[in-house]
Structure formats: C-alpha cells, structure tokens
Amino acid sequence: MIQRIQTIYLLIAFIIMGALPFVFPLETDPSGNKQIFAMDHTIDLVLFLGSALLSIISIFLFKNRQLQFVLGRLNIILNLILLGLFVYHSLTVSGGRALPEKGIGMFLPIFSIVFLVLANKAIKKDEDLVKSVDRLR
C-alpha cells in the first residue's frame, strides 16, 4: 500500500537527491567566490538523478516488497559511491590551487542514506508481518 511510512521516507530521499542538489552548492571556490553545484559536474549530476529515480521507482513498487527492498539497497550503494566521489574530490586538489570550501551539498548523500535505511527497515517489517500472517493460514 502506498500510504505506508516507507513511502514518506522514500519521498524525502527523492526530494533530497532530486531537488536539493540544485539549491545547495557542493563547494565554493575561494578565489572568485563562485559556487559549484551538482550541475557543473556531469558524473555528480548523473548519480544524484539516478538516486532520485531509484527512490521514485521504489515508491511505486509497493506491491513487490522484495524488489523494493533490493532497489533500496542499490540506492544506498549508489549514495555511498557518490559520497566516496565527494571525498575523493575533496582530498585531491591540484598543486597550485587554493582549497575549495565544502558546501552543504556534499552532505546530501548522508541524509539520503539515513532515510533509505529507515525505508528499508519499514519494508522489512512489512515483509515479516506478511510472512507471519501466511504462516497462520
């Protein structure tokens, strides 16, 4: 059923990964005070939108809880890859450049992972409930 708590968690994860990267900068260039968003890096944009797409697809797979759970785990892995990419970008700076200041956009995958874990926990709880009812029949 679509009115479950995991739908709310997945919707929040969709908003975090689909809309907020366009609002919050990933980093700020100290020399020109230019803010760098997810749109400026193609791979970041693809990973953000891929995660948002997986979240919205998972919302509408409420009848197939196993696939919904697997897509949730895949989405968590995608967010971990994105987070690793951000760490890699922040640790590798070319020799003569000043260090860019980190923006709140770098922490968006962490917030998304939290809500995806909560959604997977609720999906697992529903699946266990259905299995226990099937045993009684």
Image (tube, helix red, strand yellow):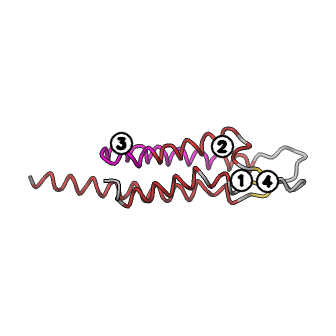
Which tag, 2 or 1, sits closer to the chain's start?
1
Asked whether the beta carbons under mark 3 and mark 4 sit within 8 Å of each other, the answer is: no
Q: Residue furthest left?
A: 137
Residue under the image location 39 percent in, 57 percent down: 6
Q: CA distance from mark 4 to mark 2?
A: 15 Å
Q: Amino acid at mark 2?
A: Asp
Magenta stretch containing residue 60, yes or no? Answer: yes
Q: Amino acid at mark 4?
A: Gln
In the rendered structure, find residue 35 and report the number of the disc placed on it: 4
Q: Main secondary structure of the magenta part?
A: helix
Q: Amino acid at mark 1?
A: Leu
Q: Where is residue 81 drawn, in percent x and y?
A: 58, 44
Using a 10 Å C-alpha cutoff, classify the residue at mark 3 as few (fewer than 14 neighbours), some (14 to 19) or many (20 or more). few
Asked whether the beta carbons under mark 1 and mark 3 sit within 8 Å of each other, the answer is: no
Magenta stretch containing residue 114, yes or no? Answer: no
According to the picture, the residue beneath numbered tag 1 turns out to be 26
Residue under the image location 72 percent in, 50 percent down: 37
In the rendered structure, find residue 44 and report the number of the disc placed on it: 2
Which tag, 4 or 1, sits closer to the chain's start?
1
According to the picture, the residue beneath numbered tag 3 turns out to be 67
Task: Please tell me whether residue 57 is drawn above or below residue 136 in the rendered image.
Answer: above
In the rendered structure, find residue 8 and report the number of the disc placed on it: none
Asked whether the beta carbons under mark 2 and mark 1 sit within 8 Å of each other, the answer is: yes
Using a 10 Å C-alpha cutoff, classify the residue at mark 4 as few (fewer than 14 neighbours), some (14 to 19) or many (20 or more). some
Q: CA distance from mark 4 to mark 1?
A: 8 Å
Q: CA distance from mark 2 to mark 1?
A: 10 Å
Magenta segment = 57-84
